[in-house]
Image (spheres, rainbow, N blue to C red):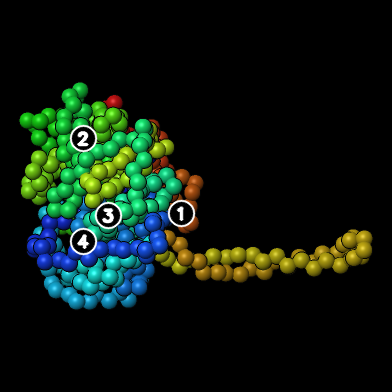
Amino acid sequence: MFAILKIKTLICSFIFALLLSFSCFSQASYKMNSDKKYSKINFQLINNLIVIPVEVNNIELSFLLDTGVRKPIVFNFIKDSDSLKVINTEKIYLKGLGNDGLVEALKSSRNKFKIGDAVNYNQVFYAIFNSSINFTPKLGIPVHGIIGFDFFKDFVVEINYTKRFIKLTKHENYKFKVCKKCEVLNLEFYNDKPYLNAQAIIEGKEIPVKLLIDSGSSDSLWLFENNSLGIKAEDNYFKDFLGFGLSGSVYGKRTKIDAFKLNSFIVENPKVAFPDSSIVANFKNIKNRNGSFGGEILKRFTTIINYKNAKIILKKNGNFKDPFEYNKSGIEIEHAGIKLVTEKEIDVVSNGYGDSKSKNVVRIDAIYSPKTKVVIKPIFNIANIRPNSPAEKAGLRKGDVIISVGANNLSSSSLQEVVEKLQGKDGKRINMVVERYGIKIKASFILKSLLKN
């Protein structure tokens, strides 16, 4: 499946290096009622990312489920989250992906978090009030934060990507079932983040790699270039905006490799990003780390994650053979809010006269009554555009408001539906209408691959 938005490939891939010690944090846990053996939670899957409902101090919010983060982070203080009280606070600074420095935040303790039937009455989280850190425009639905390790550590967590539910099972109630079609891999933990050993096949060479499991990245694979190991993009790549992290935008190379192996499971021709060396420098503290793999790989499996026993179980699902595509148009789209539009509607009022027994109508008076109504329509902007891409060469610009794609007006579309209209194979023509400074502009371009087959 197409990775939907290049914008989103790192929207949630935050690898937080917090500039303080966590040794003083309470080891409070999530608990379920004694009569509950497990809890099921339905989730939304947006751009390969899992969005789950979370109650924070009795306020209903939406969080991304991110194995690459330690403590929960709340960042979208808009609408629903405005009423969230940030209590028992102290100021800290966070460092994430990007090169824009530190981000100020508040550490809040003794909070109540409820996820399904699991409750933690002493949860620490970080509140970021920087309005630029907001996933909602990138995903098209309200997202208020991210949660990871603190949630995973207390249960055996099954993630079913095809049926879109998470099942939490108490460790004492979980019984491992032998599965001949499954692979069981060992996990290693560094700073409470899960890593595993896999193999990347590049230019015919099988290379062992240690990767972070990052469900908070919608991309497939990130690899850190290392010529001595043979981890490199060769000549078949293009430079691209990979997304943004907590500390700014991230750029790098995009390409594909021969295959990615998880024991006997072989994923053919996966899409790979090689982030710039300045970004890779942030990860030097993780010994022998070679990158990460995210949602576009994970969605191909039903996974059972057991942090306590340091195991992950993978079973192929119906997504396993989906092709890996990338953004050939060069356009990155975001949901930029809503607008009120006045539309005309016609009421037809008919009056019939006749014999009620024979049902023969003698005369009909049809009265057409024009009315107007105000409706809410979404706004989709071009948030970024790749230099020399087909879209840029067609005259499209950052900030253009997309009105239609092909014959489809986008007034009732979701962000994901809009992006899907822009995907396709080489040679597909895309016709668009955009609005710029109140003027409607037509544009047409042909999708073209930037990678050799």
Label 3 near label 1: C-beta < 8 Å? no
Quadrant of residue 335 in the image?
bottom left
Label 4 near label 2: C-beta < 8 Å? no
**CA–CA distance between discs 1 and 4?**
34 Å
Q: In the rendered view, would you say 52 is above or below 453? A: below
Where residue 358 appears, x then y in whole percent? 92, 60
- Name the residue that disc number 1 marks: 413
Q: Amino acid at mark 4?
A: Lys
- Name the residue that disc number 4 marks: 71
Nearest to the eye among marks 1 and 2: give it. Answer: 2
Where residue 285 appears, x then y in whole percent? 7, 48
Of the two numbered discs 2 and 4 on the same chain, state the one appearing first in sequence: 4
Q: Nearer the viewer, residue 19 or 135?
A: 19
Where residue 118 appears, x then y in whole percent? 34, 63
Give the crowd class for mark 2: few <14, some 14-19, many >=20 residues within 10 Å: some
Please tell me whether mark 2 sits on a helix, a strand or a loop: strand
- Name the residue that disc number 3 marks: 152
Residue drawn at point x = 22 percent, y = 40 percent: 186
Q: Amino acid at mark 1?
A: Ser
Q: Amino acid at mark 2?
A: Ala
Quadrant of residue 147 in the image?
bottom left
- Name the residue that disc number 2 marks: 198
**CA–CA distance between discs 2 and 3?**
22 Å
Q: Amino acid at mark 3?
A: Phe
Q: Quadrant of the C terminus?
A: top left
Where residue 414 appears, x then y in whole percent? 43, 54
Q: Nearer the viewer, residue 313 or 73?
A: 313
**CA–CA distance between discs 2 and 4?**
26 Å
**Residue 419 visible to the viewer:** no
Please tell me whether mark 4 sits on a helix, a strand or a loop: loop
Of the two numbered discs 1 and 2 on the same chain, state the one appearing first in sequence: 2
